[in-house]
Amino acid sequence: MYENDEKNITTFLLFYLVFFSNSPKLLFAQNLFTIRGSVQDESGKPMKGASVVINFDAFRFSTDNTGRFEVKLQPKIHAFTVKMVGYLTENFAFTLSSDTSLNIVLKEVVNQLDQVVVTSDRNNQNIIKPIGIAQLNTKILKKIPAALGETDLLRGLQMLPGVSTVGEASNGINVRGGTTDQNLLLLDETPIFNPTHMFGLFSIFPPDGVARADLYKGNVPSRFGGRAASVLDVTLENPALDSFRLETGLGLVSSRLLLDIPIKRDKLGFLITGRGAFTDFLLPIVSEKNFSDVKANFQEVSLKGLYRPNERHNFFLSGYYSNDFFQTTLLGTIGNINAAATQNQYSTLNFSVAPFYQ
């Protein structure tokens, strides 16, 4: 009996060896095969750091600096997932039966986004608005508290850093420690030598006719010449050319008038501003004894014409007239005896013509 059992076992072992010796796939079923792969984009650029996932997170690794990877796997069906930020994920599967090389190409993601408008200052903004310049316009001036009911340009400039007043009762400006005679004042490119009225209480710049004022406190352009302290470049408002406008104002100190007259629509027009002060009756009210013979008044008129022959050419004509009158008996006294009345009257007349091409 035992001899038969030994014969059966020997026969089974021989059959097993012969069967598996004729079946190499079964004999070497646990052998591992190498997969060498490379990941690149559509242009052939290697994808460094691309994520490779095999068999649903059974294996997870990243490509090297050259976009390559190498892994050993059993011979069976394997599922691959290759992904990279900004690229479409690549999913595929294949049966591994020998050493294999893979070349995986990822396609870039193209997203259709809504329109985005980005604005920025132009490269020549430092030329259009250089460093060291402060700008004021009529909208800003009207927000500043008025002195004696008058909107004043020079008082508005005193609100800027580096600009100080000459004194409490005067209207001149000192810029960065300079004196008043070290400032260049221009009205439509015409120099102004006496910028105030009424003992320096009011500036000569018409509040209704000023479009813009540029104060250069540093880096003054060479076209202005040399000034130790600053340059104040005041530009009068241009005529509208399409509509008539009339503005008036009455006050105890001064009265003003503005006329915007289009002569030929969209071609020719004039802007006229005028201001006058007739305050002789106010001074005796303050003190009839001391100011009975004191008189002070001023008048000014500014004009700006614009001729536009076509859309590319503009011709400007600017004019300014100013007159101040002052009379007093307080300048010369001997004891209680007043000297003869002293009168001072000075006028300014300026004109400028400028072509402009676009």
Image (cartoon, rainbow, N blue to C red):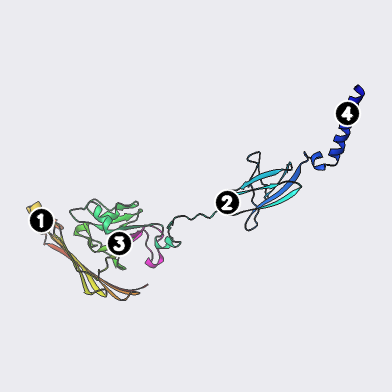
Q: How far, Cα to Cα, is label 4 from label 3?
A: 117 Å
Image height of 321 relative to 334, above or below: below
Identify the image quadrant of residue 153. bottom left
Pair 3/1: label in front: 3
The amino acid marked with disc number 2 is Leu
Q: Earlier in the sequence, mark 2 or mark 1?
A: 2
Q: Position of residue 83 (x, y in %)?
A: 60, 47
- Which residue is label 4 attached to? 8
Name the residue beneath numbered marker 2.
88
CA gap, disc 2 and disc 3: 57 Å
Residues 145 and 263: in front is 263
Residue farthest toward the right in the current orientation of the protein:
3
Report the amino acid beneath label 1.
Leu
Q: Is residue 165 left or right of residue 21?
A: left
Instruction: Give, as a single range, the part of the protein colored magenta.
Output: 211-233
Quarter of the picture containing the N terminus is top right
Q: Position of residue 128 (x, y in %)?
A: 40, 63
Instruction: Name the N-terminal-most of marks 1 and 4.
Output: 4
**How many numbered tags mark residues here?**
4
Q: Amino acid at mark 4?
A: Asn
In this figure, which residue is indicated by the disc labeled 1?
Answer: 282
- Contact check, label 2 and label 3, Cβ < 8 Å: no
Q: In this rendering, is residue 338 above or below 36?
A: below
Q: Which residue is mark 3?
A: 212
Q: Which callout, 3 or 1, points at the residue further toward the start of the chain?
A: 3
